């Protein structure tokens, strides 16, 4: 995993990070990782699992429906298309 060095961090910023980390019950390093991760993750990103779950609820699918689809699925492997 990559390591990052932050140079010339003002003392007051470092102290504030330590206080914030203590409030959240984390180390200063863990707090910095959380801050960086939150900064680069868009809050409105599409989460595929959540979207699929919501879609199946809207469609009214149940576990029985999913089981029936799995049983009806064709289990024969697809034959690759020949380009020759």
Image: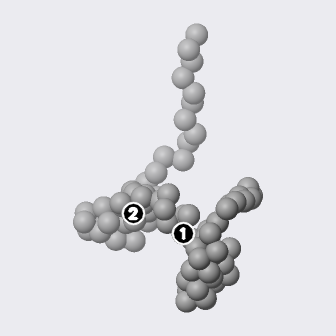
Question: What SS does tag 1 mark?
Answer: helix
Q: Nearer the viewer, mark 2 or mark 1?
A: 1
Per the image, label 2 sits on a secondary structure element best described as loop
Q: Is residue 27 above or below residue 4?
A: below
- Residue 66 in percent (x, y) is at 40, 64
Give left or right: position of 27 versus 39: right
Residue 71 visible at all: no
Label 1 Cα neighbours within 10 Å, binned few <14 / some 14-19 / many ≥20: few
- Pointer 1 residue: 35
- Residues under numbered marks 2 and 1 in contact, where contact means CB atoms less than 8 Å apart: no
Residue at position x 57%, y 30% in the image: 79
Label at residue 17: none
Where residue 31 appears, as percent x and y from the top left, is 60, 76
Q: Looking at the figure, which quarter contains the C terminus?
A: top right
Residue 77 percent across, percent down from the top left: 58, 39
Residue 1 drawn at (x, y percent): 74, 58
Residue furthest top in the image:
84
Q: Please name whichever residue, 21 or 79, is drawn nearer the observer in this view of the structure.
A: 21
Query: Which mark is first along the chain, 1 or 2?
Result: 1
Q: Residues within 10 Å of mark 2 (few under 14, many from 20)?
A: few
Left or right side of 57 for 8: right
The residue sitting at 39% across, 57% down in the picture is 46
Give the quarter of the image for residue 9.
bottom right
Q: Nearer the viewer, residue 33 or 65?
A: 33
Rendered image quadrant of residue 36? bottom right
Q: Is residue 83 left or right of residue 29?
A: left
| Residue for point 50% across, 57% down | 40
Residue positioned 32% across, 66% down in the render: 54
Residue 55 in view: yes
Residue picked out by circle 2: 43
């Amino acid at each position: 995993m990559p390591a990052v060095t932050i140079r010339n961090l003002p003392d007051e910023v470092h102290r504030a990070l330590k206080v914030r980390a203590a409030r959240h019950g984390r180390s200063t390093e863990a707090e910095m990782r959380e801050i960086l991760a939150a900064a680069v993750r868009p809050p409105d990103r599409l989460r595929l699992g959540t979207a699929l779950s919501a879609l199946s609820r809207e469609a009214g699918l149940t576990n029985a429906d999913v089981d029936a689809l799995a049983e009806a699925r064709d289990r024969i492997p697809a034959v690759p298309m020949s380009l020759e």
